[in-house]
Image: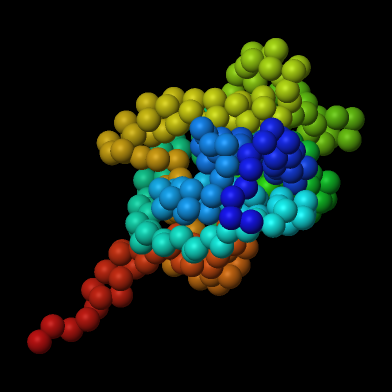
Amino acid sequence: MENLVLNPGIISGILGYIIDKGYPYNTQRAYKSALKKLVKGKQELSKEDIFIYLNKARHPNQRAIINILNQYCLQKGIDFNVVVPQMKQKPRKLPEILSIEEIKLMISAVPRPYDLMLRCIFGMGAGLRISEVLKLQWNNIRWVEWLNNKEYGVAILKETKRDKERVVNIPNGIMEELYDLAKERNILNEFKIPSGGLVFPINVNTFKPELFTMDREKWKYEYIRHAYEWVRHNIIKKVCEKALNKPLHAHMLRHSRATYLYEIEKIPIERIQQLLGHKDLKTTMIYTQVDPRTTFNMMKETKVI
């Protein structure tokens, strides 16, 4: 079949297929938006239309909708399939990293408990995304094991970037600070284990309560966007940038942590990839860029003729 007739049944069927696949809310939202742009103003969808669309598509989600369309047609026995050419990848920019001294200065400038939030971003695993620390709940942390050994903690991160669970370690010092925070908030149960919701809530009780009642998944998506922007503006921009006197973005902590583990702690890159939750080792290799100071330290003893 050269053309796919876009009757209401086809469109609603593809939308239902996206929902049935169980993608996270934000992924569903991106795919639905891509589908809307693809079929806008068309009664039929030709392969030429799709090739024109693919030439303009710049984001993987925009291209993924074609694969979803192919899968839906295959499932329904519709003779329509388009080969999606591989997208040319632009060279990635090397991420900027911060020194340990700069990170300590940032953390010391931030008020409690957001100083602990930054410590979690930098110190847990090989570094967290802001969204991951904002989604962190008290019951994601294995408190029983830590209370018994007081050596290190373990957290199971859920709803990560690719909607997969990831296990990360938590240094003992951060575990102790988290436990102290739980005691301050009076959320220890009768077994002295922290209980409750988010570890670092940002106006969570007042954020769109009507949406929370109507559509929990949409509320979660919009809350994380709201909380992310709050942290970016009120912590990173207002406090950390002022402390270091230079522009920053929160992902620098994650970049710096990966580089620190690779360069200083000599952690194998495959382990760092696992802790970061990267699918492709090439992505991890970009994060673990060589710290120029390491090269300078190696070169300072070289002889000059």
Residue 134 placement: quadrant: top right
**In which quadrant is the N terminus drawn?**
bottom right
Q: Residue at x 69, y 33 (%)?
A: 8
Residue 303 drawn above or below residue 58: below
Above/below status of 272 relative to 174 = below
Image position, residue 34 (x, y; %): 54, 40
- Farthest residue in the right direction? 190
Q: How many marks?
A: 0
Q: Nearer the viewer, residue 198 or 54?
A: 54
Q: Is residue 55 left or right of residue 179?
A: left
Picture coordinates of residue 215 (x, y %)? 73, 23
Residue located 85% across and 30% down the image: 189
Residue 15 appears in the rendering: no
Q: Is residue 14 left or right of residue 2?
A: right
Q: Nearer the viewer, residue 237 or 61?
A: 61
Taking the spot 36% from the left edge, 61% from the top edge, the residue there is: 91
Q: On the image, which quarter does residue 191 sit in?
A: top right
Q: x%, y% of residue 173? A: 62, 47
What is the image's colouring? rainbow
Residue in the picture at 40% in, 40% down: 249
* Quarter of the rendering containing residue 286: bottom left
x then y, percent, for residue 182 = 71, 30
Most distant residue in the left direction: 305
Q: Nearer the viewer, residue 133 or 209?
A: 209
Q: Quadrant of the C terminus?
A: bottom left
Q: Is residue 163 visible?
A: yes
